[in-house]
Image (cartoon, helix red, strand yellow):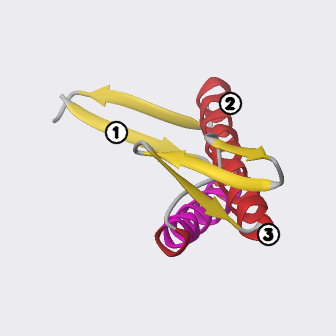
Amino acid sequence: MKNVSTISVRAKRVTYPLLAVTILVFVSNLFCVLVIGTSAFPSGKIANGRYLVEEHGKAIELTRSAYWFSYVHTLTMVILFLVMALVVIYFHWTGDMKHERRDEQ
């Protein structure tokens, strides 16, 4: 038995650019987490005008702009991952993406 995957031109036109954007946002998010030292989503909170992120038992204080940039950037990444998953599920459902097992001859 041989596994064969096929993808239509229509599915390629949608999934490949979306995958490229998703990977780019993921890599840039990793870079931002390394530079800032944390991610404000989902563990960030605003207390008494201070922007705090609790991670590994300690609180890290961020500037207002760094906090919101980190929060929105990570939220965007999560949404893109969900959209990518829904697009792949949709194309599997419509038959534009197939995964079959075939007998070898």
Q: Which residues are magenta?
A: 13-33
Q: Which residue sits furthest front?
A: 48
Q: Residue at x 64, y 40 (%)?
A: 42
Coordinates of residue 85 in the picture (x, y in percent):
60, 36
25 to 79, vertically: above or below: below
- For badge 2, the amino acid type reads Tyr
- Quarter where residue 102 is shown: top left
Q: Residue at x 70, y 41 (%)?
A: 83
According to the image, label 1 marks what residue? Answer: 4
40 to 101, vertically: above or below: below
**How far apart are the two marked residues, 1 and 2, measured between alpha carbons?**
19 Å
**How far apart are the two marked residues, 3 and 1, measured between alpha carbons?**
48 Å
According to the image, label 2 marks what residue? Answer: 90
Q: Is residue 63 magenta?
A: no
Q: Which residue sits furthest top?
A: 93
Q: Are marks 3 and 2 in contact (CB under 8 Å)?
A: no
Label 3 secondary element: helix
Q: Residue at x 68, y 30 (%)?
A: 90
Mark nearest the camera among 3 and 1 is 3
- For badge 3, the amino acid type reads Ser
- For badge 1, the amino acid type reads Val
**How far apart are the two marked residues, 3 and 2, measured between alpha carbons?**
37 Å
Label 1 secondary element: strand
Mark nearest the camera among 3 and 2 is 3
According to the image, label 3 marks what residue? Answer: 65
Q: Crowding at label 1, few (<14), some or many (≥20) Cα neighbours within 10 Å? A: few
* Pointer 1 or 2: first along the chain: 1
